[in-house]
Image: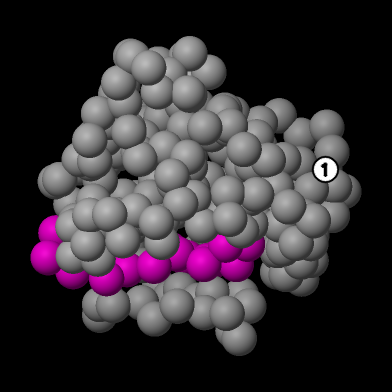
Amino acid sequence: MNNLVLVRHGQSQWNKERRFTGWADIDLTEQGKLEAEYAGQLIKKLNIEFHAYFTSKLKRATNSLNIILKILDKPKAEVFKSENLNERHYGGLTGLNKDETIKKYGDEQVQIWRRSFNVSPPSMESDHPYKNKINTKISSESLEDTFKRVIPYYDKKIEPILASKKNVLIVFHGNSCRALLMKIFRITKSKIDSFEIPTGNPLLIRFENNLVIKDFKYLDVKRSKKIIFNV
Protein backbone atom coordinates (compact mmCIF):
# COMPACT_ATOMS: atom_id res chain seq x y z
CA MET A 1 0.00 0.00 0.00
CA ASN A 2 1.22 3.51 -0.75
CA ASN A 3 0.04 7.03 -0.03
CA LEU A 4 -0.72 10.32 -1.73
CA VAL A 5 -1.23 13.38 0.46
CA LEU A 6 -2.74 16.50 -1.11
CA VAL A 7 -2.73 19.88 0.64
CA ARG A 8 -4.24 23.15 -0.50
CA HIS A 9 -1.96 25.93 0.73
CA GLY A 10 -2.79 27.80 3.93
CA GLN A 11 -4.87 30.97 3.86
CA SER A 12 -3.33 33.68 1.66
CA GLN A 13 -3.77 37.43 2.10
CA TRP A 14 -6.22 37.51 -0.80
CA ASN A 15 -8.12 34.51 0.56
CA LYS A 16 -8.63 36.61 3.67
CA GLU A 17 -9.68 39.64 1.63
CA ARG A 18 -11.95 37.50 -0.58
CA ARG A 19 -10.15 38.49 -3.76
CA PHE A 20 -9.63 36.40 -6.89
CA THR A 21 -5.98 35.37 -6.80
CA GLY A 22 -5.15 32.99 -9.63
CA TRP A 23 -1.55 33.46 -10.78
CA ALA A 24 -0.98 36.59 -8.67
CA ASP A 25 1.87 35.66 -6.34
CA ILE A 26 0.29 36.45 -2.98
CA ASP A 27 1.81 35.18 0.26
CA LEU A 28 0.33 33.53 3.34
CA THR A 29 -1.35 35.33 6.23
CA GLU A 30 -0.30 34.51 9.78
CA GLN A 31 -3.35 32.25 9.95
CA GLY A 32 -2.20 30.60 6.73
CA LYS A 33 1.19 29.89 8.25
CA LEU A 34 -0.51 28.34 11.28
CA GLU A 35 -2.69 26.23 8.98
CA ALA A 36 0.43 24.97 7.20
CA GLU A 37 2.08 24.19 10.54
CA TYR A 38 -0.96 22.24 11.69
CA ALA A 39 -1.09 20.42 8.37
CA GLY A 40 2.54 19.45 8.92
CA GLN A 41 1.75 18.16 12.41
CA LEU A 42 -1.15 16.06 11.11
CA ILE A 43 0.99 14.62 8.32
CA LYS A 44 3.82 13.86 10.75
CA LYS A 45 1.45 11.75 12.85
CA LEU A 46 0.94 9.47 9.85
CA ASN A 47 4.57 8.37 10.16
CA ILE A 48 4.90 8.15 6.37
CA GLU A 49 8.25 8.32 4.60
CA PHE A 50 7.70 10.45 1.51
CA HIS A 51 9.74 9.78 -1.61
CA ALA A 52 8.83 12.93 -3.57
CA TYR A 53 7.48 16.41 -2.89
CA PHE A 54 5.67 18.57 -5.46
CA THR A 55 4.32 22.11 -5.46
CA SER A 56 3.50 25.01 -7.78
CA LYS A 57 5.67 28.04 -8.48
CA LEU A 58 3.46 30.37 -6.42
CA LYS A 59 4.79 31.30 -2.99
CA ARG A 60 1.60 30.66 -1.03
CA ALA A 61 2.01 26.99 -2.01
CA THR A 62 5.81 26.77 -1.87
CA ASN A 63 5.93 28.49 1.51
CA SER A 64 3.20 26.19 2.85
CA LEU A 65 5.29 23.21 1.73
CA ASN A 66 8.42 24.70 3.31
CA ILE A 67 6.60 25.01 6.63
CA ILE A 68 5.37 21.42 6.37
CA LEU A 69 8.84 20.15 5.51
CA LYS A 70 10.24 21.90 8.56
CA ILE A 71 7.67 20.13 10.75
CA LEU A 72 8.58 16.82 9.08
CA ASP A 73 12.27 17.54 9.75
CA LYS A 74 12.94 17.51 5.99
CA PRO A 75 13.96 21.14 5.37
CA LYS A 76 16.53 20.18 2.72
CA ALA A 77 14.33 17.72 0.81
CA GLU A 78 14.33 17.99 -2.98
CA VAL A 79 11.16 19.71 -4.14
CA PHE A 80 9.74 19.63 -7.67
CA LYS A 81 8.08 22.93 -8.64
CA SER A 82 5.96 23.39 -11.74
CA GLU A 83 3.63 25.99 -13.21
CA ASN A 84 1.48 23.06 -14.24
CA LEU A 85 0.38 22.84 -10.58
CA ASN A 86 -0.41 26.57 -10.34
CA GLU A 87 -3.89 27.83 -9.50
CA ARG A 88 -6.17 28.47 -12.46
CA HIS A 89 -5.63 31.86 -14.09
CA TYR A 90 -8.58 34.09 -13.17
CA GLY A 91 -7.95 36.52 -16.02
CA GLY A 92 -9.58 39.91 -15.64
CA LEU A 93 -11.07 38.93 -12.28
CA THR A 94 -7.59 38.77 -10.73
CA GLY A 95 -7.42 41.03 -7.69
CA LEU A 96 -11.15 41.82 -7.62
CA ASN A 97 -13.14 41.40 -4.43
CA LYS A 98 -15.58 38.51 -4.81
CA ASP A 99 -18.45 40.26 -3.03
CA GLU A 100 -18.09 43.40 -5.16
CA THR A 101 -17.89 41.25 -8.30
CA ILE A 102 -21.12 39.49 -7.31
CA LYS A 103 -22.84 42.89 -6.91
CA LYS A 104 -21.65 43.90 -10.39
CA TYR A 105 -22.27 40.70 -12.36
CA GLY A 106 -24.69 38.74 -10.17
CA ASP A 107 -24.18 35.68 -8.02
CA GLU A 108 -25.12 33.21 -10.76
CA GLN A 109 -22.57 34.54 -13.25
CA VAL A 110 -19.76 34.70 -10.68
CA GLN A 111 -20.56 31.16 -9.54
CA ILE A 112 -20.28 29.99 -13.16
CA TRP A 113 -16.88 31.67 -13.49
CA ARG A 114 -15.68 30.19 -10.22
CA ARG A 115 -17.00 26.65 -10.32
CA SER A 116 -18.10 25.55 -13.78
CA PHE A 117 -15.86 23.20 -15.72
CA ASN A 118 -15.53 24.87 -19.11
CA VAL A 119 -16.36 28.58 -18.73
CA SER A 120 -13.44 30.99 -18.45
CA PRO A 121 -13.56 34.38 -16.70
CA PRO A 122 -13.02 37.50 -18.84
CA SER A 123 -9.47 37.70 -20.24
CA MET A 124 -6.81 39.79 -18.55
CA GLU A 125 -6.44 42.90 -20.71
CA SER A 126 -3.16 44.73 -21.38
CA ASP A 127 -3.99 47.52 -18.89
CA HIS A 128 -4.73 45.15 -16.00
CA PRO A 129 -2.56 46.08 -12.97
CA TYR A 130 -1.21 42.51 -12.73
CA LYS A 131 -0.60 41.99 -16.45
CA ASN A 132 3.13 42.72 -16.21
CA LYS A 133 3.52 41.03 -12.83
CA ILE A 134 2.47 37.60 -14.11
CA ASN A 135 4.93 36.01 -16.51
CA THR A 136 2.66 33.93 -18.72
CA LYS A 137 0.95 34.05 -22.08
CA ILE A 138 -2.23 32.73 -20.47
CA SER A 139 -4.94 35.40 -20.28
CA SER A 140 -7.68 33.38 -18.53
CA GLU A 141 -8.48 29.76 -17.70
CA SER A 142 -11.50 27.58 -17.10
CA LEU A 143 -11.20 24.54 -14.84
CA GLU A 144 -11.01 22.52 -18.07
CA ASP A 145 -7.91 24.49 -19.11
CA THR A 146 -6.39 23.86 -15.69
CA PHE A 147 -7.23 20.16 -15.99
CA LYS A 148 -5.44 20.00 -19.34
CA ARG A 149 -2.12 21.08 -17.77
CA VAL A 150 -2.41 19.43 -14.35
CA ILE A 151 -3.29 15.93 -15.55
CA PRO A 152 -0.53 15.43 -18.15
CA TYR A 153 2.01 16.60 -15.55
CA TYR A 154 0.57 14.20 -12.98
CA ASP A 155 0.52 11.34 -15.49
CA LYS A 156 4.14 11.89 -16.49
CA LYS A 157 5.84 13.01 -13.28
CA ILE A 158 3.78 11.86 -10.29
CA GLU A 159 1.72 8.79 -11.12
CA PRO A 160 4.79 6.67 -12.04
CA ILE A 161 6.19 7.31 -8.56
CA LEU A 162 2.92 6.21 -6.98
CA ALA A 163 2.77 3.20 -9.28
CA SER A 164 6.14 2.10 -7.94
CA LYS A 165 4.54 1.96 -4.48
CA LYS A 166 6.16 5.12 -3.19
CA ASN A 167 4.62 7.99 -1.22
CA VAL A 168 4.06 11.49 -2.57
CA LEU A 169 3.12 14.85 -1.01
CA ILE A 170 1.67 17.64 -3.18
CA VAL A 171 0.99 21.16 -1.91
CA PHE A 172 -0.87 23.29 -4.42
CA HIS A 173 -4.14 25.18 -4.97
CA GLY A 174 -7.89 24.81 -4.83
CA ASN A 175 -8.51 24.47 -8.55
CA SER A 176 -5.41 22.50 -9.48
CA CYS A 177 -6.40 20.12 -6.67
CA ARG A 178 -9.99 19.97 -7.95
CA ALA A 179 -8.67 19.11 -11.40
CA LEU A 180 -6.51 16.30 -10.05
CA LEU A 181 -9.30 14.88 -7.92
CA MET A 182 -11.55 14.79 -10.98
CA LYS A 183 -9.13 12.26 -12.43
CA ILE A 184 -8.35 10.28 -9.29
CA PHE A 185 -11.96 9.97 -8.11
CA ARG A 186 -13.63 10.23 -11.52
CA ILE A 187 -15.71 13.22 -10.52
CA THR A 188 -18.03 14.25 -13.34
CA LYS A 189 -18.09 17.70 -14.93
CA SER A 190 -21.62 18.18 -13.58
CA LYS A 191 -20.58 17.50 -9.98
CA ILE A 192 -17.24 19.28 -9.79
CA ASP A 193 -18.91 22.70 -9.52
CA SER A 194 -20.04 21.87 -5.96
CA PHE A 195 -16.70 20.46 -4.79
CA GLU A 196 -14.78 22.67 -2.34
CA ILE A 197 -11.20 22.21 -1.12
CA PRO A 198 -10.42 23.48 2.41
CA THR A 199 -7.16 25.37 2.97
CA GLY A 200 -4.43 23.67 4.98
CA ASN A 201 -6.29 20.39 5.50
CA PRO A 202 -4.34 17.37 4.20
CA LEU A 203 -6.28 14.80 2.18
CA LEU A 204 -4.80 11.32 2.55
CA ILE A 205 -5.47 8.87 -0.29
CA ARG A 206 -4.24 5.29 0.19
CA PHE A 207 -3.76 3.00 -2.79
CA GLU A 208 -3.62 -0.74 -3.21
CA ASN A 209 -2.01 -2.50 -6.19
CA ASN A 210 -2.42 -0.84 -9.60
CA LEU A 211 -3.40 2.42 -7.91
CA VAL A 212 -6.78 1.13 -6.82
CA ILE A 213 -8.06 3.41 -4.07
CA LYS A 214 -8.22 1.68 -0.70
CA ASP A 215 -9.56 4.60 1.31
CA PHE A 216 -9.23 8.36 1.80
CA LYS A 217 -9.86 10.99 4.47
CA TYR A 218 -9.18 14.57 5.48
CA LEU A 219 -6.79 14.56 8.42
CA ASP A 220 -8.47 17.50 10.18
CA VAL A 221 -11.91 16.00 10.67
CA LYS A 222 -13.41 19.22 12.02
CA ARG A 223 -12.59 21.05 8.78
CA SER A 224 -13.42 18.24 6.39
CA LYS A 225 -15.39 18.77 3.21
CA LYS A 226 -17.73 16.09 1.99
CA ILE A 227 -16.33 13.89 -0.75
CA ILE A 228 -19.18 14.03 -3.26
CA PHE A 229 -18.96 10.60 -4.81
CA ASN A 230 -18.65 6.93 -4.01
CA VAL A 231 -15.45 5.06 -4.82
Secondary structure of the residue carrying tag 1 is loop
The vertical placement of 147 against 12, above or below, is: above
Check the image and tell me how it is coloured. one colour
Judge the density around disc 1: few (<14), some (14-19), many (≥20) Cα neighbours within 10 Å: few
Would residue 76 be visible to someone looking at this image?
yes
43 left or right of 205 in image? right
User: Quadrant location of the C terminus?
Assistant: bottom left
Would residue 202 be visible to someone looking at this image?
no
Looking at the image, the residue that sits furthest to the front is 104
The vertical placement of 144 against 31, above or below, is: above
The residue segment tinted magenta is 189-207
The vertical placement of 47 against 63, above or below, is: below
Residue drawn where x is 61% and y is 58% of the image:
16
Horizontal and vertical percent position of residue 230: 25, 80
Residue drawn where x is 47% and y is 23% of the image:
129
Quarter occupied by residue 60 = top right
Towards the viewer: 210 or 191: 191
Horizontal and vertical percent position of residue 124: 31, 26
Towards the viewer: 143 or 99: 99
Q: Is residue 199 magenta?
A: yes
Which residue does the numbered mark 1 point to in the structure image? 74
Residue drawn where x is 39% and y is 56% of the image:
100
Q: Is residue 202 magenta?
A: yes
67 left or right of 136 in image? right
Q: Amino acid at mark 1?
A: Lys
Residue drawn where x is 22% and y is 35% of the image:
122
Horizontal and vertical percent position of residue 121: 24, 41
